[in-house]
Amino acid sequence: MSIAEAYDVPVSGRPLVPPSPPRAPENMGTFGRIMAMRDSVIASWGPRAYREDIIQARFFLRSTFIVSRPDAIKHVLVDNYENYTRTAPGIRVLRPILGRGVLIAEGRAWKHQRRTLAPAFTPRAVATLVPHMIAGIDEAINKLKANADRPADMREAMQRMTLEIAGRTMFSFEMGRHGTTLREFIMEYGEQLARPHPLDLLLPLGWPTPQDFARARFRRRWTEFMKVVMAARRAIGKNEGAPPRDLFDLLDAARDPETGAAFSEEQLRDEVATMILAGHETTATALFWALYLLALDPATQDEVAAEARRVMASGEIDVERLEFTRAVIDETMRLYPPVFLIARAAAAPDTIADLAVRKGDAILISPWLLHRHEKLWRDPDAFIPARFVPGAPEPDRFAYLPFGVGPRVCIGAHFALVEATLALAKLVGAFRFDLIDRKPVMAVGVVTTQPDHSPMFSITPRSRVG
């Protein structure tokens, strides 16, 4: 079977429709959904979730609302966001590896962290980190060139590249010494501890589950490792009077603009872990899916390569001129949003779209569902980067949420977009990517939108492409 036969490869102007996971049967019971969620939350959603505005269901004495209506999403994430906090399962899964960093903090603690971190992620601050990004990307390209005659696992390659970029932008040093250990921690947690146990969904947060004990042991080892890495960075020292050299300098020097308070050592460690993990994994995931889609759509891949050649002709690269490459990234994150689910719990009664919400009810806003919703998108399952080129009609602000929205929008969104756009342009400018594996890749929802397996690619230097 050829690649074209295995996949719905675009022909005669028809857009690519990549394979997507089968949708759950509508009559799947509560126990069946819980078991499906252990493998992939995406697998627990049926056809109704892709065409209805709001679905309400009972789940162990409480209501769960799957919300795909833009005005209702605005109400939850913007207008009344303080009433909607992280759910107990989400905290159980994220706290052992992120601690009490900005991603999962609440209330006054979150406001302090957000205010303090904000200056480190302005466009001007991110611009100072671009040389670190390019150094990590160029290193990855050189490794791929050295092994261009061998099949390549681009999922692993993107994880290693973004981890290297995370190390350089955070600590100003290459991750050769710590990168393997860091990746082992991440893989261990993702494969063994990030999948929710049924009791994670049922028990109150104060009641530990079997997984929580294992997560606590992981947390102790992880914390000690982060102390070692931070000590290594501090040993480098600071350039007195010079601008900050990396994110660690920026975070270490950060002060709350209202109180003047700095981060404590424990807070700084949790923020560093959050920035490395959240940024590294989500960007690696987005780049893998982008390369996968471009391998299935050679014409679009060639267009990205042509733009990269034009923009880099002078020897420098201006990310603002990579308009089509950025559109490919945007469309990739529509089809495969790195964060597939935003889960919130109501702290007090409320009304959403005329539906009564009680304290403790769960509100699920899924970028995966929202971005493929039949009411919100034309050809929702098709890969059409033209949706996002300059001049195209913009999607509803609350129908496209690759980084969330509102006060809790991802603080590193600009950083991630710059990194992903630069990386995709340089990679596709250097190589042609083709799939070797015939088995279609399915998305799996476990913390991020991961592939169910890592397909092998052939990579051909563009200098050899006719």
Image (cartoon, rainbow, N blue to C red):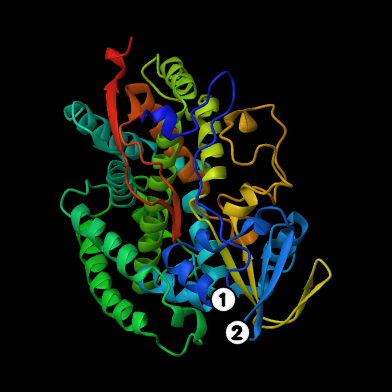
Q: Are the residues tagged 2 and 1 within 8 Å (C-beta)?
A: yes
- Relative horizontal placement of residue 151, taking residue 434 as reference (left or right): left
Residue at point 36%, 48% (across, down): 244
What residue is disc 2 on? 60
**Label 1 element class:** helix
Residue 266 in view (yes/no): yes
> Which residue reaches farthest top?
466
Query: Which residue lies under the disc numbered 1?
Result: 30
Question: Is residue 235 visible in the rendered structure shown here?
Answer: no
Side of 246 where 293 appears, left or right? right
Residue at 39%, 21% in the rendered image: 316
The crowd level at tag 2 (other Cα within 10 Å; few <14, some 14-19, many 20+) is: few
Q: Residue at x 42, y 24 (%)?
A: 317
* Horizontal and vertical percent position of residue 12: 57, 18
> Which quadrant of the view contains residue 223?
bottom left
Where is 138 relative to 357, above or below?
Answer: above
Instruction: Say which quadrant the N terminus sits in.
Output: top left
